Image (tube, grey):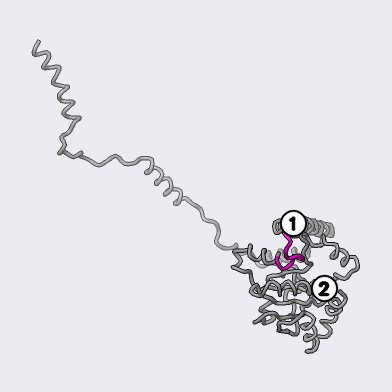
Amino acid sequence: MTAILAALAAPALGQSSAQAPTSGSQEAGPAAPDQPMERLKQAMAKRKATAVNGPSKLPALPQDLRRRAFEGLNGRLPSREMDQRARAARDAAARRLDVEQAAMNAKIYKALGLALPGTDPEQNAAAVTGSSAPASWVPVLFVSSSMPVETLRTYAGQLERARGVLAFRGVPGGLGRIGPMAELSARILRRDPGCEGPACAMRDVQLIVDPILFRQHGVARVPALAMVPGDPTKPYCEREDEASPPGAHLVFGDAALSGLLEEYGRIGGDKEVKDAQARLRHR
């Protein structure tokens, strides 16, 4: 019986000694490799080796074939139907853009607490009588946000009658902060400086930020007046002549608009200021 028990215990003792190595021993042999990562590396290497690159240059065509291709393009008959469709699509896109711009302007004016242009009775009356028709020469007054707000408000009232434009070189605080410029515009254009809310009426004057216009006229100090041909409020991409010539003269001085126009006419620009002076005197 004792021999049988000893024979049964011998294999168990051998297994425990094999499974539990001593604390001072180290495992022999390298660790098993990470098989999924190895397979991924091999697949990527194989994909790079078999990748096919596209052509790096156009194929060299025979001279005769190239000549025939260009003759075919030049000999293409214009399609009147295609032109009409293209013009209709362009006009439809322009109308959609106008609707979107009007909606966006309404949201901006509402956020600033201003009334939309054309909602004021005096402005509507002026539009009916035709006094707001654009002139061929527009008085542009170059100003700065560092000028007193009351001075800018006074100029805005005078430019409204003369159908002029207030031009700024840049935006207070930089282009990344449009809030200060929007607040300054609201303070300048409100007819009643004490009015708050969306019911406030504003002056019908365009304010533009155009450093290119400043550079074209060489404006180094403000206020300054120039008579600009065309519509300076249009984006440059929408103007008929993108490189429109600047005004012939530039008048400096902290004076009323009537005085600046008079000085502009005295130095040779009497034809340019004639319409603006007439509108200023009429109202």
Residue position for label 1: 198
On the image, the x and y values in percent for residue 268 come to 80, 88
Question: How crowded is the residue under tag 2: few (<14 C-alpha within 10 Å), some, or many (20+)?
Answer: many
The residue positioned 61% from the left and 66% from the top of the image is 175
Magenta residues span 187-197
36 sits to left or right of 283: left
Residue at position x 67%, y 82% in the image: 218
Queried whether the magenta region covers residue 195, the answer comes back as: yes
Q: Secondary structure at mark 2?
A: helix
- Mark 1, Cα crowd under 10 Å, few <14 / some 14-19 / many 20+, is some
Is disc 1 placed on a helix, strand or loop? loop
The residue lying toward the viewer, choosing from 179 and 18, is 179
Residue drawn 74% across the image and 56% down it: 198
Which residue is pictured at 84% across the width and 60% down the height?
80
**In the rendered image, the vertical position of residue 45 relative to residue 80, given as above or below:** above
SS majority, magenta:
loop
Instruction: Indicate the quadrant containing the C terminus: top left, top right, bottom left or bottom right.
Output: bottom right
- Is-magenta flag for residue 104? no
Separation (CA) of disc 2 from disc 1: 24 Å
**Identity of the amino acid at label 2?**
Arg
Instruction: Single out the residue that lies furthest toward the right.
Output: 129
- Residue 126, position as x, y percentages in the image: 87, 67
Q: Which residue is mark 2?
A: 161
The amino acid type found where label 1 is placed reads Pro
Residue 237 visible from this viewpoint: no
Q: Is 257 in front, or is 241?
A: 257
Q: Is residue 251 visible?
A: yes
Q: Which mark is residue 114?
A: none
Q: Position of residue 43 (x, y in %)?
A: 42, 45
